Amino acid sequence: MTAGQSLIEEYLPKIKALDGLKSVQRVVCGDCKDLKLIIAFEADKFDKLAEANLEEGFLAGLKDIDGLDTIETQTVTLMPM
């Protein structure tokens, strides 16, 4: 998990600098050791994430970490209720 956290810390300043960013959250499951990075954007500025072209490098960095067996991306909508 340390290598994953280091990669997050490398990319975090770049992510936080993006226009329209609402929040960044790291989620780790203590039992299964899942690591998730949730990046929330204003809906009308979501395209700024793709324009920044950070995802490809971040995913490549994850693939280089020994012991990670599943790497996925997912686009969802979040709404507080």
Image: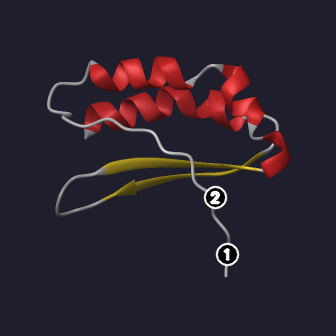
Residue at 21% in and 53% down: 33
- In the rendered view, would you say 25 is above or below 71? below
Q: Quadrant of residue 16?
A: top right
Q: How many residues crowd around disc 2 within 10 Å: few (fewer than 14), some, or many (20 or more)?
A: few
Task: Classify mark 2: helix, strand or loop.
Answer: loop
Residue at 37% in and 38% down: 72
- In the rendered view, would you say 11 is above or below 31? above
Figure quadrant of the N terminus: top left
As drawn, is 7 to the left or to the right of 17?
A: left
Residue at 28% in and 60% down: 29
Q: Inspect the image, locate mark 1, and give the three-letter code of the amino acid beneath it.
A: Pro
Q: Inspect the image, locate mark 2, and give the three-letter code of the amino acid beneath it.
A: Thr
Q: Quadrant of residue 63?
A: top left
- In the rendered view, would you say 24 is above or below 31? above
Q: Calculate the distance from the C-alpha at mark 1 to the C-alpha at mark 2.
A: 10 Å
Q: Nearer the viewer, residue 37 or 70?
A: 70
Q: Which residue is mark 2?
A: 77
Q: Quadrant of residue 59?
A: top left
Q: Which residue is mark 1?
A: 80
- In the rendered view, would you say 46 is above or below 40? above
Give the image location of residue 76, x and y in percent: 58, 54
Give the image location of residue 57, x and y in percent: 48, 17
